[in-house]
Amino acid sequence: MKGDLRFVFDTNALISAALIRASISRQAFDSACQQGTLLLSWPIIAELQEKLSLKKFDKYISENYLGDFEMKNNKMPNFANAVH
């Protein structure tokens, strides 16, 4: 069944899921990852990188963490360590 369901999250939901472990967005994200496939687009990835680079997120996110969202050589970023 994992391959049958596909999920898309907007940037605000992804940021909430990444920063607030007890958030509804995080619960939905974790559930989506367990039940199906998370779909991402380059515009969502670009917006996510842009928003997480804002100074207001500096106290929550380290440079190493942001590195997981960087797009290099037009390849899909590595999200393995991005959301815990």
Image (spheres, helix red, strand yellow):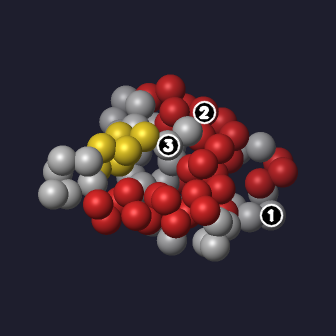
Q: Quadrant of residue 36?
A: bottom left
What residue sits right under mark 2 in the picture? Answer: 47
Q: Amino acid at mark 2?
A: Glu
Cα–Cα gap, marks 1 and 2: 19 Å
Q: Quadrant of the N terminus?
A: bottom left
Q: Which badge, 3 or 1, comes first in the chain's sequence?
A: 3
What residue sits right under mark 1 in the picture? Answer: 59
Give the residue drawn at x 43%, y 40%: 8
Q: Amino acid at mark 1?
A: Lys
Is disc 2 in contact with disc 3, using a CB cutoff of under 8 Å? no
**How many neighbours does mark 2 have within 10 angstroms: few (below 14), some (14-19), or many (20 or more)?**
some
Cα–Cα gap, marks 2 and 3: 12 Å
27 sits left or right of 5 in the view? right
Give percent across and percent down for residue 21.
Answer: 61, 72
- Image depth: mark 3 or mark 1 in front: 3
Is disc 1 in contact with disc 2, using a CB cutoff of under 8 Å? no
Give the residue drawn at x 61%, y 62%: 24
Q: Which badge, 1 or 2, comes first in the chain's sequence?
A: 2
Q: Amino acid at mark 3?
A: Phe
Q: Is residue 17 visible?
A: no
Q: Nearer the viewer, residue 20 or 25?
A: 25
Residue 48 versus residue 78 in the image, above or below: above
Q: Quadrant of residue 65?
A: bottom right
- Image depth: mark 1 or mark 2 in front: 2
**How many neighbours does mark 3 have within 10 angstroms: few (below 14), some (14-19), or many (20 or more)?**
some
Residue 34 versus residue 57 in the image, above or below: below
